[in-house]
Amino acid sequence: MAMAAILLLFLTLFSNSKADRDFDVRQHLCTVTRYGAVKDIVDNSFIPSDIPQGCTPIHLNLVARHGTRSPTKKRVREMEKLASHIKELIEDAKQRNLSLQKVPAWFHNWESPWKGKLKGGELDIKGEEELYQLGIRVRERFPDIFNEEYHPDVYPIKTTQIPRASASAVAFGMGLFSGKGSLGPGRHRAFAVTSESRASDTILRFFECCQTYKDFRKNQEPSFNKLKEPILTEITSALAKRYEFNFTRQDISSLWFLCKQESSLLDITDQACSLFSPTEVALLEWTDDIQMFMVKGYGKSLNYRMGVPLLKDVLQSMSEAINADEDNQVPGSYEKARLRFAHAETVVPFSCLLGLFLEGSDFERIQKEEPLDLPPKPPQKRNWRGSIVAPFAGNNMLVLYSCPANSSSKYFVQVLHNEHPIPMPGCGSTDFCPFQVFKDKIVEPHFMHDYDTLCNAHLDESKHKPETSKLSQLFHWIFRLGGNDDTPSHGVEL
């Protein structure tokens, strides 16, 4: 019995050790994950459909996130504060005559890699490469779609007015049309990239135009902070004991952000990331995933219902392609692909509108607008992982197929997530769905929700409210001065 117990203990330790060695932190960084680290992670239990013989792709819709980007100005300042605070922690340890043997070597002379950077948020060179290579792979995978002479009406490329998204569109287009022109050694060609005003882009930046959503997101912050507080407290205590530093929860939050940035942008995993055990990384990843679930995903139906204009745009392009096919229109006279480049706040709600990454019977629950449970906490498995749902350059492709007349349906829709077939719960958990079923079961149930009604109803109501008198405004201002209003203002960083 004693030998058996010792053997069991040895096997457990060996198994845990191997799991730790196989653990790649670069696959656990939520939406800061690079595309190449996760694009080929798929659900092995799902067997993709075999495309029936004779079925030909006739149109493609792409909704993609921008590629890997630099940290924003706000985050750059946070990293500079962290560098100063690390110096203070070391000095504090010296004054308390603590041994510095446990202090990570990189702490001593660390400076923020972005020190002195005045701008931020731009597309990184790694992000350029992600989209460029994606463009090449898409063209090679669907030669029947990209066999026409380029024209902006045949291959429209749409993006938001945010530079990292438009730069991603350009990088993708350079890959897609490489060798098709006469410019430079790579025989590139010029192509058009168009965008709507940020103030009115309800197709790709619906989240920024939706006042109801912006109010909801601001009000959710306390709830989320309360949810993640126990995790941060637990990890703060563990690291304080491990390294004998007076870490705060803010320190842990900043070090976790540094880990994500170092891994994605600099390929450094042996500094900030090495502070955390795989179990702690999994918990920190889960808090990020929960936040994404609550304010971008299935946590509230508003998060994805406001994406209905984008869903309508996708359906419209498919319907037009079917009409062109039915009418035998001349090649080059109709659209063959609609290519869009935006943000995680676009890709995540769009994935939800399609019903992707749901557990069990959750699809029926979202159709009834019932709230979903939060994704389970590690070590339990979950479908909802930000690193898979919306990594840098994450994407959904909806490919419309025309099939022979003897098929069960003439037109089918295949959904690819990050270039891999993915099951649609609304279509019997297949990735290859008859167009009419896709339209009736997945798309049109969302159309009962009008964007303006969802997003701006309270603005219309406010127009009918009587104006507050100048005198009452004055009294309100005086009483505010007399109180102690320490409530911080909340900006939404998208």
Image: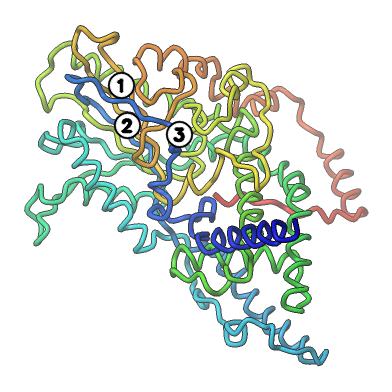
In this rendering, the label closer to the viewer, 3 or 1: 3
Q: Where is mark 3, residue-wise?
A: 45
Count of labels in the image: 3
Mark 3 vs mark 2, CA separation in Å: 26 Å
Indicate the secondary structure of the residue bearing disc 2: strand
Q: Earlier in the sequence, mark 2 or mark 1?
A: 2
The kind of residue on which mark 1 rests is: Met
The kind of residue on which mark 3 rests is: Ser
Image coordinates of residue 132 in percent, x first then y, are: 27, 53
Q: Where is mark 1, residue-wise?
A: 318
The residue at 38%/30% (across/down) is: 47
Q: Is residue 307 left or right of residue 182?
A: right
Mark 2 vs mark 1, CA separation in Å: 8 Å
Q: Earlier in the sequence, mark 3 or mark 2?
A: 3
The kind of residue on which mark 2 rests is: Asn
Are discs 2 and 1 less than 8 Å apart at CB? yes
Tell me the quarter of the image containing the N terminus: bottom right
Image coordinates of residue 440 in percent, x first then y, are: 44, 12
Say whether residue 163 is visible: no
Q: Earlier in the sequence, mark 3 or mark 1?
A: 3
Q: Where is mark 2, residue-wise?
A: 61
Image quadrant assignment for residue 235: bottom right
Q: Badge 1: how crowded within 10 Å, few (<14), some, or many (20+)?
A: many
